[in-house]
């Protein structure tokens, strides 16, 4: 049985393909044109092995809908017995007469690609046809893999789930074999910003890393809102209350509100405490996580899983962010440890709590890595292997 992963947003499928290959499964990643450079396999590994099982397919562009022949798509998909996809993968499978086995949404593919959008006149017809096929393709998928999120996305699942089985865990976005503190430390010489991260570590008593997008100040119904301003205001409050603690924040020029964050940092008098970095590859960013005391997630909506969260868990670094535990206790017997904060006051309080008992939070972070290995990586590998086995035994697995 051969598995084809379609698309690689957030490097999700590259991580899962490697996990399956670690277990002897033949798995390839078919990259879509237009995916950001930091979501390419080269951004998420320290070696060149990926070149043997990752390639780009040029038909996966919704704006070329009318110019791509169904048999062209079907030809590329014919090598695979099991298809796993994100983005417009459901639509392209539908066009080729294939059913997507496992749909793994990352956000926009469920929230935006299922509704008609404004486009230039020469693109609107192609995009509208792709949206219709996307809706059909999602509903026909055999499995809908998505961790329990929040009311914004759960309502979309209810609308488009069709008869699919729901897997109540997120994709293991971070390959745990690549990202251990020891392996990242050994690979620092092959990354871009290790010297800068190390220097920042040396001059800080408390080093925070915020590498989520800078998106804040918009509608509370917008799932993209990160509450970045709450983090910055909490940092300013902590610094005012603890002037002897050399606190630093490393952050990345990523998101539509970078300039707005820069202005708020200036207004709060935090410029000397904030070190900006350019947007970077995950393999470079993980060096920053290795040096950080705390990784900062999001402070607007409650999320159980995300790239930032799983990166912190995989590296065993304490995590600061907002989580509404009541949303997730039905799915998990236990949750990973978190410094739970949403408001500026709560951010400040959690930072003070960490400083007062670092050893406790470091042990909790080690427990967080074990949680990730058991409830995310372990669950995903088990379900995928069982699904692949079931397809190999079923006549329906014939293409």
Image: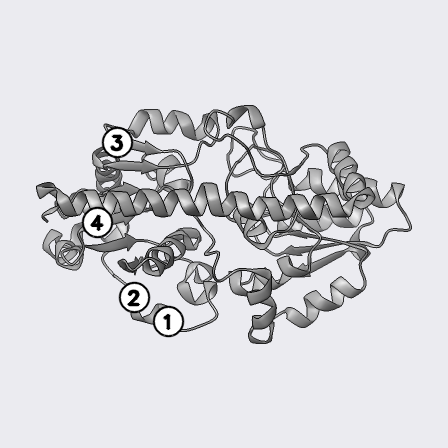
Residue at 23% from the left image edge and 42% from the top image edge: 101
Residue at 27% from the left image edge and 58% from the top image edge: 25
**Decide: marks 4, 2 in contact (CB < 8 A)?**
no
Q: Which mark is residue 36?
A: none
Q: CA distance from mark 4 to mark 1?
A: 22 Å
Q: Which mark is residue 82?
A: 4
Residue that badge 2 annotates: 53
Q: Which mark is residue 164?
A: 3
> For numbered disc 4, what is the local secondary structure?
strand
- Which numbered disc flags the more N-terminal residue, 3 or 2? 2
Using the image, determine if residue 294 lies above or below residue 110: below
Q: CA distance from mark 1 to mark 2?
A: 8 Å
Indicate the position of residue 150 as horizontal and vertical percent values. Answer: 48, 28
Residue at 42% from the left image edge and 46% from the top image edge: 378
The image quarter containing residue 32 is bottom left
In the picture, the quarter occupied by the N terminus is: bottom left
Name the foreground residue: 318 vs 84. 318
- Which numbered disc flags the more N-terminal residue, 4 or 1? 1
**Decide: marks 1, 2 in contact (CB < 8 A)?**
yes
Q: CA distance from mark 4 to mark 2?
A: 15 Å
Q: CA distance from mark 3 to mark 2?
A: 28 Å
Indicate the position of residue 236 as horizontal and vertical percent values. Answer: 80, 43
């Amino acid at each position: 049985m051969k598995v084809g992963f379609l698309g690689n947003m957030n490097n999700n499928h590259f991580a899962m393909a490697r996990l399956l290959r670690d277990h002897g499964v033949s798995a390839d990643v078919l990259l879509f044109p237009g995916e950001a450079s930091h979501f390419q396999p080269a951004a998420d590994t320290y070696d060149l092995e990926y070149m043997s099982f990752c390639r780009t397919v040029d038909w996966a562009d919704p704006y070329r809908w009318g110019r791509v022949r169904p048999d062209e798509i079907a030809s590329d998909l014919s090598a695979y017995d099991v298809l796993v996809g994100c983005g417009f993968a459901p639509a392209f499978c539908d066009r080729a007469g294939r059913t997507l086995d496992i749909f793994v949404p990352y956000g926009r593919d469920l929230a935006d690609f299922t509704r008609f959008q404004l486009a230039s006149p020469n693109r609107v017809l192609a995009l509208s046809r792709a949206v219709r096929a996307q809706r059909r393709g999602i509903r026909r998928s055999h499995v809908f893999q998505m961790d329990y999120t929040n009311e914004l996305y759960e309502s979309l699942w209810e609308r488009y789930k069709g008869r699919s089985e729901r897997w109540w865990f997120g994709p293991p976005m971070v390959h745990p074999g690549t990202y251990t503190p020891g392996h990242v430390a050994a690979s620092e010489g092959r990354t871009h910003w290790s010297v800068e991260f190390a220097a920042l570590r040396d001059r800080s008593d408390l080093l925070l890393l915020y590498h989520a997008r800078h998106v804040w100040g918009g509608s509370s119904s917008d799932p993209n809102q990160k509450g970045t301003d709450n983090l910055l205001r909490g940092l300013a409050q902590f610094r005012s209350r603890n002037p002897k603690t050399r606190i630093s924040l490393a952050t990345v020029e990523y998101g539509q509100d970078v300039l707005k964050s820069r202005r708020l940092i200036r207004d709060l008098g935090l410029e000397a405490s904030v070190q900006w970095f350019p947007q970077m590859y995950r393999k470079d960013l993980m060096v920053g996580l290795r040096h950080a005391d705390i990784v900062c997630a999001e402070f607007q909506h409650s999320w159980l899983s995300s790239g930032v969260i799983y990166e912190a868990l995989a590296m065993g670094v304490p995590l600061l962010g907002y989580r509404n535990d009541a949303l997730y206790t039905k799915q998990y017997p236990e949750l990973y440890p978190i410094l739970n904060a949403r408001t500026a006051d709560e951010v400040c309080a959690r930072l003070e709590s960490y400083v007062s008992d670092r050893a406790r939070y470091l042990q909790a972070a080690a427990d967080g890595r074990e949680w990730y290995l058991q409830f995310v990586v372990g669950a995903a590998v088990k379900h995928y292997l069982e699904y692949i086995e079931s397809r190999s035994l079923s006549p329906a697995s014939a293409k």
